[in-house]
Amino acid sequence: MKKLVLIKIGGSLITDKTKPLTVRDDMMLTAALGIQQAVEKNPEHAFIVANGAGSFGHYLASQEEGSNPEDRIHAIHESVVLL
């Protein structure tokens, strides 16, 4: 049975938290290349990759203007799926 490895990429690493809904393409590429190397060097492992929300979920979570909680949760979820 393969060993399971979780790699969690921080949202503040792959997004620009000073700009709402902004990806840092350079860091996404760096993270992807690092994951690729890990997978290639460790074929006996199974990998799960997760990411934080960064400027996607955190920005929308801080907005409180008139929306109900269910709408906000849905918007946050959709933004993180987009990321």
Image (cartoon, rainbow, N blue to C red):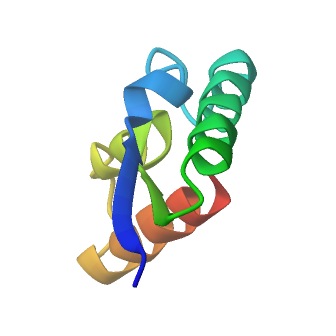
Q: From the viewer's perspective, is 73 left or right of 14?
A: left
Residue 45 drawn at (x, y percent): 47, 63
Front-lying residue, 51 or 6:
6
Q: Is residue 40 above or below residue 22?
A: below
Residue 68 drawn at (x, y percent): 29, 76
Front-lying residue, 72 or 35:
35
Residue 43 drawn at (x, y percent): 60, 59
Q: From the viewer's perspective, is 60 left or right of 64?
A: right
Q: Is residue 33 above or below residue 53?
A: above
Front-lying residue, 73 or 6:
6
Residue 39 drawn at (x, y percent): 61, 50
Where residue 62 sits, quadrant-wise, is top left
Residue 52 in view in this figure: no
Where residue 31 sits, quadrant-wise, is top right
Q: Is residue 64 above or below residue 3?
A: above
Residue 31 in view in this figure: yes
Front-lying residue, 33 or 80:
33
Q: From the viewer's perspective, is 9 left or right of 22?
A: left
Instruction: Residue at 32%, 62% (x, y): give it.
Output: 66
Q: From the viewer's perspective, is 54 left or right of 68?
A: right
